[in-house]
Image: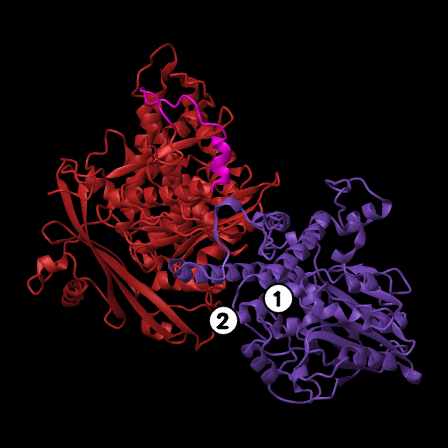
Amino acid sequence: MPKSAPKSVNIRTYQVGFGDCFLLSFNYAGGKKKHVLIDFGTKALPKGSPKGLMLRIANDIKAVVGNDLVAVVATHRHQDHISGFKRRKGKGPGDIIRSLKPKVVIQPWTEQPDLARKATGPTSKRFGKGTKKRIAALKRFGKGAEQRVAALSDIHAIAAQVVEAAQRGRFPKSMRERLSFIGEDNVKNLDAVKNLMDMGQKAPVYVFSGSSSGLNRLLPGVKVHVLGPPTVEQSDKIKSYAKKSDQYWGFQARAMRVVGPVGRAHAKAKGDVLFPRHVASRGPNFPVETRWFIYHSRAAQAEQLLSIVTMLDKVMNNTSVILVFEIGKKKLLFPGDAQLENWLFALDGTNVKYKKLLKSIDLYKVGHHGSWNATPKKLWNLFTKKSTGSGPARLKTLMSTLEGVFHEEHEVPRGKLVTELKSQSDLFSTQQLPKGKISEDTPVQV
Amino acid sequence: MRNMRGSQHSLANTQKLTIIAQDPSVKIGGKILVAEVEVPAEELLPGPRGYRVNVIDFDTATSTLYQPAVLKPDANGLYPFELKKDVHGVVRKRPQNYDKRLLSDPTFHAQNVYAIAMRTLSHFEFALGRRVPWGSDGHQIHIAPHAFVDANAFYSRDDRAIFFGYFMGPSNKPIYTCLSHDIVAHETTHAILDGIRSRYLEPSSPDQAAFHEGFADVVALLSMFSLPDLVSQLLDLDSSGNHLISNAHLTREALRKSILLGLAEEMGLGLSKGRESALRRSVELKPGKPYMSMPEFSEAHDRGELLVAAVMNAFLDIWIARLDKIGFISRGKKNRSLVVEEGARVASHLLTMAIRAIDYCPPTDMTFGDYLSALLTIDREVVPDDTKYGYRGALLKNFKNFDIVPDADAGIDGTWKRFDKKLVYSRTHFDSMLRDKEEVFRFIWENREAFEIDERGYIEVQSVWPSIRIGPDGFTLRETVAEYVQIMTLQARELKALLKIEPPRDLPATMRIRIYGGGVLIFDEYGQIKYKIANRIEDRKRQTARLKYLWESGALDSEQKAGMRFAQLHRARMSRSE
């Protein structure tokens, strides 16, 4: 290990309810410290959380990092990972983080702004026309990059439509909440995104599997490996990769845009429906013989919307940056919310190097708040340091989550997974934090 | 005795309703191609709400209930949207804005879904010679022609409904899935097949998952070919009313391109890539590859396309064989209406066979091989001599081309073997056995040894259906079809010890696993067993393969509701990349 390497690392896990916020502090000889903030967002805070909790957290981060925040990592564009970066006229938590002047901001390649297709701009078949920057970006991220980014943008639009539909549709309360929860998590989060774009002192770094993290020079003695997300070309190489057409999202976004006049139910004017001259009733009281069916139609509609947002939520999760910090013999894994499809590339048989790294992981940030398929069996089975015993060599796991607010196919966190984490590792979950305590430190000796 | 209309004559059995022949993008001479179809006659309530279908036009997206459609003839005896014909039965002129009204009047949309659903149902009832229930509870299925904003349409057992979505098309005009003949017939078929074989929605083999999709496509396509105007127009894209057609348009390749690919292309317009590519891909599949074992054909839709490819290619072969027997009217030209009629006949015969074959398939864990054996058997039952048109030969050849061979238990010619074991009939009564599940159960129980039924599992007679078919001699052929299923639920670790089934290696030992078996008993007109078509629950090989497939595809790990399966499946189809 080089002399300049850190002696220890501390990971501070913040209480952000259903969200992620981790502050990694690398302690060097002579008391020098360098810090990396991984995500800062929430979708739901625990009941009874004090007002301004996110501000308190931002101030705590400020107090810890001083002038030594080397990087902010925003793993992916979900509200529960980036909402804390939102600014509010100089007084929001995002303003505080901005004032810390991180050296660099790291995001997935899909956030590279030059890839975004302008509605009126030229479309390119391979690298096409456009600014130099754009062509450079397309070359770097390869075939299909532009379509993927367009698809993600469509996903935000669809999510917004679903949120609107959830609010206006007469669904049972619990269903409305589920739809809004996932839908809102996937809307654009523009404020936070804009802040992240130019917060760093250096140009932002957009990473993909195998690319440089941009952190190696900033963190002496630490190797940072980027395992994900794969580019379109990379993921296409994996045969078993569940291939969902990026074109589909464009199709779906357009399909749902049956607006003006159709589709805006809250406007009461007659002309706002498909066939204004044939309306029998707009409710709330419908003829007796139709009520059973209307109730069922609404339930079926809600299920439909849920399946759409669940699908798109997954796509967005799979843009997550997966990082492994290697300090001497210790390895820390932070995979954001990466789900199976993102992992498949890193876990593919040909990636011997990644497999070797993953086998000796010492600390694992549990993916996607403990959901059922963000910790694939294939990954979990690789970890060699998990055990039922105790001791410093045992695998450590950190989970930031909040029970009872999020469901996809299964509850989050998934009971089975939590049981496994408890029995095989030193698990810390933010749910263990007592009221009033906003964070927990996990020191790792190197 | 007088009937309700005050006449002593019997009432008409059918009525004619106007539908859009394929979808609004298919036009002749710039006009949407419409067709009149016969559906069972009935006194409809507004909706229309009849004895099997209840159309309720509620749009969840805008929370709007539209006025129910009233389908009654006007003072001139014309049904809504029926085009006036001259004395020769030819439509001379369409009323102004007729096409526009087809799109903008929800009354027509309701009529379109009602007529296609009833027509599809009547195909089944005609083929099976009995009333056929929907898969969902109740007698009347709900149909919502504008259920929500989404490029999706599906049958939902739990909601006793078929929902049709609408969405924004590429030209920024709404597209209604309820106006696509193919989609309406496809969804209706799901609801009917679920009524005949409810266990086919259970997670099982890749074949069973694919069968619902492939079969629904086959029914939708074959019933479309019985619309003469559509076929005539697709043949050579000639809408001038020319009575002759050049033989150049009637080669195998020309027909494949015009009829099948042509249809696929039309279907793609404005609708979704998913549906267009399904048909196109199944037509373009080259014969002779080991498709059934290729991983790219393990997903339900892809695999379903193999069934479509086999049946549609057989359809072409038989049609061409029949066309060869038609003489030329002038040099190189044949009579167009004869050509079309022959096509319609083949389609109709194949459709009837395709439907009847369901009765001859095991009630659980079915495979394409089972279906092929069932098709061949049913055809042999009704038409023992296959030499005239060679339906069975064409089916065998074309199924083999797509790697589907008859079940291993079938005879040399691919048909099911007759049941020839000795049975005890004396403790049950013939008459009750025709309709009584309890009686059939007793019969099975008494004969469980002869039927080789494992005694450890739960056994239930699921249905008993007397059915009537017309035999080749013109006499009615009476058959009774009884379905029994066997279910066993046990822990993964018990599978090997109790049944020698090898569970997948990483399957948790205490996971609860449900396995199925069961069979169909076909009684002849004397109440004797003709066929027993069964999958035994203790079939080690089949159960091992099923568990492997379910475990690998994640089906054992998810808690998906069977009733909403099509919603997910059809979305997957739409989202599939090319």
Q: Considering depth in this image, is B475 or B309 the residue closer to the camera?
A: B475
The answer, for residue B284, to whether it is visible in the render is no
Q: In the rendered picture, chain A carries what hue?
A: purple
Q: Which mark is residue B218?
A: none
Image quarter where the N terminus of chain B lies is: top left
Report the side of B120 relative to B567 (left or right). left
In the rendered image, the quadrant that contains the C terminus of chain B is top right
Q: Chain of mark 1?
A: A
Q: Looking at the image, is B338 positioned above or below residue B139? A: above
Q: Residue at x 34, y 32 (%)?
A: B78
Q: Secondary structure at mark 2?
A: loop
Task: Write down the colour of chain B.
Answer: red
Judged left or right of residue B577, residue B450 is: left
B111 in the magenta segment: no
Could you tell me which residue is drawn at 30 percent across and 35 percent down?
B348
- Quarter of the figure with residue A391: bottom right
Specify the label residue A180 is tagged with: 1
Instruction: Determine the secondary structure under disc 1.
Output: helix
Identify the subunit bearing mark 2. B
Q: Is B239 or B18 nearer to us in this picture?
A: B18
Check the image and tell me how it is coloured: by chain
The amino acid type, in three-letter code, at marker 2 is Asp
Numbered tag placed on residue B506 in the rendering:
2
Q: CA distance from mark 1 to mark 2?
A: 37 Å
Q: Which span of residues is magenta-colored?
A: B84-105
